[in-house]
Image (cartoon, helix red, strand yellow):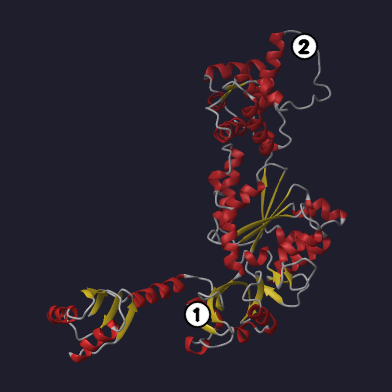
Amino acid sequence: MRIDVFFSDRVGIAQEVLAELARRSFNVTAVEVDPPHIFIEAPAVDQACLDELRAQLMGVAGVRSVEPVQMLPGAQRRLYLDALLASQPDPIFAVDEAGCIVVANGAAIGACSLDETRLIGTSMQELIGNPELLRELVNGGYHLPVCEVVMNGEPYMLETMPLHEAGGRVAGAVMTLHAPSRMGERMSALQNYDAGGFEAVLGSSPAMEQLKQRAARMATVDAPLLITGETGTGKELLAHACHAGSSRSGQPFFALNCAALPESLAESELFGYAAGAFTGGLRGGKPGLLELAHGGTVFLDEIGEMSPYLQAKLLRFLNDGSFRRVGGDREVRMNVRIISATHRKLEDMVSSGHFRQDLLFRLNVLHLHVPPLRERPGDILPIAHAFLGRACTQASRPPMRLSQGACAAMLSNPWVGNVRQLQNVIFRAVTMTERNVINVEDLELAQVAAPAQAGDEREVATLEQAVADFEKSLLQRLYREFPSSRRLAKRLGTSHSAIANRLKRYGID
């Protein structure tokens, strides 16, 4: 049984309490003194003799109560501490002031490939193989920026937290090793927390439904995927959906815009760099996106802008999964799926010598093409209404709607910037419009109107003729996507007979 002796603090009271147990020949296996408590573990004490023992101990001057407890506080803290350390997936070491290991969690034991009995007491220098780093840690009171170390052949980012005694002297430190893949999982979770699957890809036209069905099948195939399409069509959103629908969905997803960075920065971002690779880099080096995304997906946007040097280095990785960091001499192997995207025609770039043909073959194992918005006019208004709801929420506006004139203007707009342009137009209109109805002039204020094309400025005879010309043009464009009078009537929200009469009037068949 374990008991708690509550007492009024005085010199020698703990000795008197233990002497009373010894006089009764109770074997004491553990004692914790934490004034005003003495916690005692005596296995031979049972409930039958507790009352008699309590009466004897209450006779000791200063003892105020004797009650049973489930567990000694020190043992309870050790149990919880062991459970806490075991739950941490990163290797954690507690070292003394000389850098020798005092405590290590299960992940640390597994990373070192040593038995716990052999690991305890071992110097961290033997594990990381860098005597200068350990010397700097000890001499600097374990205050050192995050740096990279190699343990058992694997790279880790080292983070230290010094432990201080009551007087301020450094008694050691807690050293945590972060594997690049674990760091990648956390970074990806922060960056992509709201990324959805195929339901986030807006559009329900036949072309988009076919694209989503094709993409869903390709998502399950663990092979490189090339997504083509004009700027603003949502290629990155489709790449997110393909990752979410793959077997790698629980692993990191990172994106790199190849056109946004110069060659040197793009290389270090993608492949990482070794210690001393260049001035201003992190001490010990830094893992790149390919290491952070181990087991997951890397999306390379605007792959057509990648330099010839990086094309060759990426081709090497696609061939055998290995690469070298910038300034490094060690081969790194990673399991990463590459999804790339471009708005350029890579075949023409191959012909002109600006893109490697062998790299195109490696990237274009699977292929998806996102059609521009002007080729699927049936998606314009549904997407606009979805963006309108989001914009009202973001701008803290009451629900708004589009007038018929605004809808007609949007259907006739060429949308050179595709879905991204449509989103910007809606958001600007919501921001600048005071009314709850967005009219044509509000869209013009948001610069929705496209420049007049040559030959479109013909003389208008009458209002009826102008309306008829617009109506005919609209029906001709929508009839290609909804090739029946009933489907077209449902799309435009009118009767079947009204649409049939107009199709007949304008000779559309």
Percent position of residue 271, x then y: 72, 66
Percent position of residue 3, x then y: 24, 77
The answer to whether residue 385 is left or right of residue 66 is: right
Looking at the image, residue 279 lies above or below residue 200:
below
**Residue 473 seen:** yes
Percent position of residue 239, x then y: 62, 52
Residue matched to label 1:
104
Please name whichever residue, 78 or 83, is drawn nearer the observer in this view of the structure.
78
Please name whichever residue, 483 or 36, is drawn nearer the observer in this view of the structure.
36
Looking at the image, residue 193 lies above or below residue 9:
above
- Mark 2 residue type: Val
Residue matched to label 2:
460
- Quarter of the figure with residue 146: bottom right
Looking at the image, residue 91 lies above or below residue 498:
below
Secondary structure under badge 2?
A: loop
Q: Residue 73 — which label?
A: none
**Picture quarter with the N terminus:** bottom left
**Picture quarter with the C terminus:** top right
Percent position of residue 354, x then y: 85, 56
Circle nearer the N terminus (2, 1): 1
Q: Disc 2 vs disc 1: which is toward the camera?
A: 1
Please name whichever residue, 56 or 448, is drawn nearer the observer in this view of the structure.
56
**Residue 67 seen:** no
Secondary structure under badge 1?
A: strand
Q: CA distance from mark 2 to mark 1?
A: 85 Å
- Mark 1 residue type: Ala
- Quarter of the figure with residue 97: bottom right
The answer to whether residue 106 is left or right of residue 230 is: left
